[in-house]
Amino acid sequence: MSATVTYRDGSMNNYAVHLLPTLVAQLDAYEDDEHPDIAVSHESGWTLSAFPSGLLVWENVDADGEEDSWPATPRHLREVPRERLPELLALCADGQFDELERLPWRAGNF
C-alpha cells in the first residue's frame, strides 16, 4: 500500500515516516487561506487532514456513497494536540483504519 502527503502549499510527495515532523511543523509556519491544511492520503482514498486550529478531518475522498466506503461523509475531531498528529497521520498512511475508527469522531468536517 502507498500513501501521499500534502503540504500547506498544495505540493505532494510520496509518504515516508521521516516527513511527518516537517509536515506537522507547517501548520505553524505560515498562514495560507488557499491551502489551510496538511494531509496524508492512503491509496484507498482514506485521508486524514489537519488544520492549524487543531481540527482533524477523517474522510474517504474517493467515496461516492458506496457501501464499502462507509462512512462517505467526513468526520472530525477538535483540539487535537500537535504532539498526536505524527502518530495519527502514520496510522492513516499505514492503513491502520481500525485504530483511527476508535477515536471519538463527530459528523461533518467542521
Image (cartoon, rainbow, N blue to C red):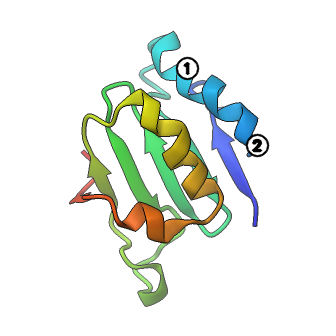
Q: Earlier in the sequence, mark 2 or mark 1?
A: 2
Q: Residue 81 is drawn in which quadrant?
A: top left
Q: Is residue 45 left or right of residue 104?
A: right
Q: Secondary structure at mark 1?
A: helix
Residue located at (49% from left, 48% from top) = 88
| Amino acid type at image mark 1 | Ala
| Amino acid type at image mark 2 | Ala
Residue for badge 2: 16
The disc label shown at residue 25, or none: 1
Residue located at (54% from left, 28% from top) = 24
Q: CA distance from mark 2 to mark 1?
A: 15 Å
Count of residue discs: 2
Q: Is residue 20 left or right of residue 25?
A: right
Camera-side residue of 31 and 1: 1
Q: In the picture, which quadrant includes the N terminus?
A: bottom right
* Number of other residues with Cα within 10 Å of mark 2, as a class: few under 14, some 14 to 19, many 20 or more: few
